[in-house]
């Protein structure tokens, strides 16, 4: 679609969406009234900056039904992320929302060369996580034979991949790297016929892309999304592999200065903000993703007119993405305090053999110094289980001597991220 027509379509949908949420969602209406803006003030996308921002704290405050814009009887599904203190973000979907989400994921599959003749193996997690359901639905829309494998059980993954001749692989980049290594180790590499991979949910480098492409013999493509907006398929790479096209007929993207909240021009690095203009049940207006990136409006040689976003270059908050899971230091702190441990801890994230590792050093309270080695080991195991329940992934916990974690005169250095992601 020509940019002028696309802009007109965005304006039409934005005006309708703003009016709808103002009339049907008291939480939105209160935020707009507090800023002194009404739907009559929004006549097109040029008026978008007049609207208030929405943040993850708003989603927590409005949990679970406070941002719902459709009657619950019209909603057919939820998806969810892990919460910062156990309270999750729950997104609601009407059937129309699911249809549009699957359309966006179908576009991502077509962009990597997918057709009805392909066999698409989906190894993202299913259930509450959006990865599996999104790409599964997109694969159906394209007409691919879909292998709904979910994550894990690598031996079975490789068996189906080779026996059924999978041509498109959808999973996290770290799991793709692990599948490649396993295929080589088991002598199955020559039986693999993949042509493309759609990898997302965690940060990965160009070096990692080249390594996966060399080992699996495919072209590796990035995909972007978040549960608050629907899931994967908000943006995706095309054959050029030079940034992810944003589905602008469904999502309006802005980049802002995270401190001043000023809207920045294309080409400047800032925090990514999205407005969902077609979602029914759970519309997001000016949602601050906290992802730092650059928007590129230059024409793409693939022919798509939608603007492109770079890979996220970091975060404007303290969230970590580890093995595709959102992790906040506050979650770990909550577990420690609930278990009677002091808030003297340090988190170390690294990437070993293309897989993220998460280690948590925790200072032992002085009164526990007399415990036996077996007692210490048992306490570490209890903390590992408690963190797995909170985070959804496994962290290695190490109880260390009091005052052994370096102190800072300023803000405590809680996180050491050794991964070279950008």
Image (spheres, grey):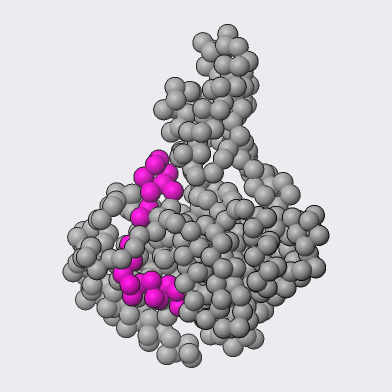
Name the side, left or right, on which 54 lies relative to 335.
left
Q: Position of residue 266 (x, y in %)?
A: 53, 73
Question: How many numbered tags mark residues here?
Answer: 0
Asked if residue 364 shows in the view, the reply is: yes
Give the residue at x 40% y 40%: 85
Report the side of 282 relative to 145 (left or right): left
Would you identify the image quadrant in which residue 124 lies? bottom right
Question: Where residue 405 sits: x, y (%)?
Answer: 61, 25
93 drawn magenta: yes
396 or 343: nearer the eye? 396
Residue 301 screen position, x and y as percent: 64, 86
Please name the residue shown 50% across and 63% down the image: 132
Q: Quadrant of residue 311?
A: bottom right
- Is residue 304 shown in magenta? no
Q: Is residue 28 visible?
A: no
Vertical position of residue 120 compared to residue 362: above or below: below
Q: Which region shows up in magenta?
A: 82-103
**Extreme residue in the front direction:** 163
Q: State left or right for residue 79 relative to residue 38.
A: right
Quadrant that contains the C terminus:
bottom right
Q: Is residue 375 above or below residue 93?
A: above
Q: Residue at x 50, y 50 (%)?
A: 326
Residue 417 in percent (x, y) is at 64, 44
Residue at 35 percent across and 55 percent down: it is 90
């Amino acid at each position: 679609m020509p940019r002028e027509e696309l802009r007109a379509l965005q304006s039409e949908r934005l005006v309708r969406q703003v009016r709808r949420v103002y009339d049907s969602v008291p939480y939105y209406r209160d935020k707009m009234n507090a800023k002194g803006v009404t739907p009559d003030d929004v006549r097109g996308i040029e008026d978008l900056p007049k609207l208030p921002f929405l943040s993850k704290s708003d989603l927590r405050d409005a949990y679970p039904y406070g941002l719902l814009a459709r009657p619950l009887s019209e909603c057919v599904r939820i998806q969810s992320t892990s919460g910062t203190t156990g309270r999750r973000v729950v997104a609601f979907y009407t059937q129309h929302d699911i249809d549009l989400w699957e359309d966006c994921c179908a576009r991502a599959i077509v962009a990597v060369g997918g057709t009805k003749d392909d066999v698409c193996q989906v190894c993202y997690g299913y259930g509450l996580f959006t990865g599996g359901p999104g790409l599964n639905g997109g694969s159906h829309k394209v007409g691919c034979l879909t292998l709904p494998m979910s994550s894990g059980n690598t031996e079975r993954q490789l068996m189906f991949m080779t026996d059924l001749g999978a041509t498109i692989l959808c999973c996290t980049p770290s799991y793709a790297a692990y599948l490649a290594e396993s295929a080589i180790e088991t002598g199955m590499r020559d039986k693999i016929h993949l042509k493309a991979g759609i990898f997302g949910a965690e940060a990965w480098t160009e070096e990692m892309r080249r390594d996966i492409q060399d080992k699996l013999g495919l072209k590796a493509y990035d995909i972007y999304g978040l549960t608050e907006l629907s899931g994967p398929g908000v943006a995706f790479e095309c054959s050029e592999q030079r940034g992810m096209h944003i589905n602008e007929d469904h999502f309006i993207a802005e980049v802002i200065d995270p401190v001043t909240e000023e809207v920045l021009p294309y080409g400047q690095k800032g925090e990514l903000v999205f407005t969902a203009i077609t979602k029914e049940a759970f519309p997001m207006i000016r949602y601050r993703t906290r992802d730092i990136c650059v928007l590129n409006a230059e024409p793409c040689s693939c022919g798509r007119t939608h603007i492109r976003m770079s890979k996220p270059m970091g975060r404007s908050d303290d969230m970590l993405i580890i093995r595709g899971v959102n992790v906040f230091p506050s979650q770990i702190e909550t577990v420690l305090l609930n278990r009677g441990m002091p808030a003297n801890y340090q988190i170390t994230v690294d990437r070993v053999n293309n897989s993220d590792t998460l280690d948590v050093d925790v200072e032992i309270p002085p009164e526990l110094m007399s415990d036996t080695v077996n007692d210490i080991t048992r306490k570490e195991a209890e903390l590992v289980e408690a963190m797995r329940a909170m985070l959804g992934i496994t962290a290695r916990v190490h109880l260390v001597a009091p005052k052994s974690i370096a102190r800072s005169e300023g803000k405590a250095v809680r996180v050491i991220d050794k991964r070279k992601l950008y």
